[in-house]
Amino acid sequence: MTEEEKIFSGGVAVITGAGAGIGMGIARRCGHIGMTVIVTDIDKANADKVAADIISTGGRAEAIKVDVSKPEALDALAQDVFDRHGAVRLLVNNAGIETIGNVWEIPTARWETTLNVNIHGVVHGVRAFVPHMLRVGQEAWVANLASVGSFGQMPTQTAYMMSKHAIQSFSECLYLEMQVAKVPINVCSIIPGMLKTSIFDAQAGKGEPQSAVAHRATMAHMMANYGMDLDEGCRLFVQGMAARKFWISSQPEMTEQMLAGRIAFFEKQATPALSDQTRALLGL
Ligand SMILES: NC(=O)c1ccc[n+]([C@@H]2O[C@H](COP(=O)([O-])OP(=O)(O)OC[C@H]3O[C@@H](n4cnc5c(N)ncnc54)[C@H](O)[C@@H]3O)[C@@H](O)[C@H]2O)c1
């Protein structure tokens, strides 16, 4: 039995945004190591497919439609899962969207969706599930999706970048709250470098300004050509959670590079400046 199986097998995993991309990859991995996987997504048809895929390979899974931008949907999910399964060993607050465009060009609705999904979806996932975890009293895990973008700057991706900075801060403070409260809940910050997913697909940009189209296409191209294999990245994430790590990176060298840049920026209290890499990405 692997360490992951020892820790997680027989437990329940709840994963948001698990109908595609990283959520799907983590769901498949959790199913593979013997967890019962609650595959949630705003897109029920995709969640159904992922759950069916896990079941077809001998695992246990069910699909539930959940829109993480609605706090009451997360409350209902937590109540339902704890009522039917008794406990949740792993909650992965994964659902997230990219939004591209200058701050002043992004329509209000897209701004609100971005902040509601990327920030409030994580906050209310924790608010809804942790009281149940505490009541049950067993060791549990809460993993939140940050990004290497949590440590960087990228014009025209401001909405996304600020949300990922927020999630890193949220997870750090949440980790300390668990220490202060002396409760057996492990908090993990999942930091993908770049994994091959559909986050930059053209249809995911609905509601973005016209100026976003070219940058989205550049990022999609980069992800398709240089992104890490999804299942390999998600295997590393689950392995890191089983090891009770706080920092869990798919590409640690990318995390280190971004952190080094951030540290230098802070040490110098530097004025933000466009790097050569940023200029190239923006076609400047
Ligand atoms: N792919 C990467 O390289 C990368 C890098 C850094 C961080 N991340 C983070 O990983 C997470 C997953 O990204 P991905 O690349 O797999 O994206 P993706 O677009 O491939 O998948 C995201 C999933 O979330 C779902 N979703 C969107 N809005 C939702 C909502 N309101 N409620 C519930 N589900 C919703 C989508 O339907 C989709 O199934 C995000 O938080 C993202 O910021 C990804």
Image (tube, grey):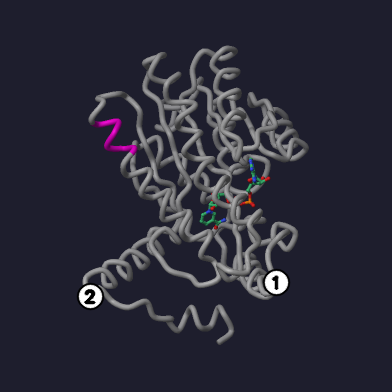
Q: Which of the numbered marks, if any, corresponds to residue 54?
A: none
Q: Is 3 situated above or below 204?
A: above
* Residue 260 place in picture, x, y as percent: 30, 68
Q: Amino acid at mark 1?
A: Val
Q: Quadrant of residue 62?
A: top right
Q: Which residue is mark 2?
A: 268
Which callout, 1 or 2, points at the residue further toward the start of the chain?
Answer: 1
Residue at (61, 58) in percent of width and height: 196
Report whether 257 appears left or right of 220: left
Residues 269 and 142: in front is 269
| Marks 1 and 2, how far apart at CA | 35 Å
Residue at (49, 22) in percent of width and height: 88
Q: Which of the numbered marks, if any, corresponds to residue 213?
A: 1
> Which range is magenta?
174-179
Q: Quadrant of residue 16?
A: top right
- Mark 2 sits near ligand 1, with its Cβ under 8 Å away: no
Residues 135 and 23: in front is 135
* Residue 161 shown in magenta: no
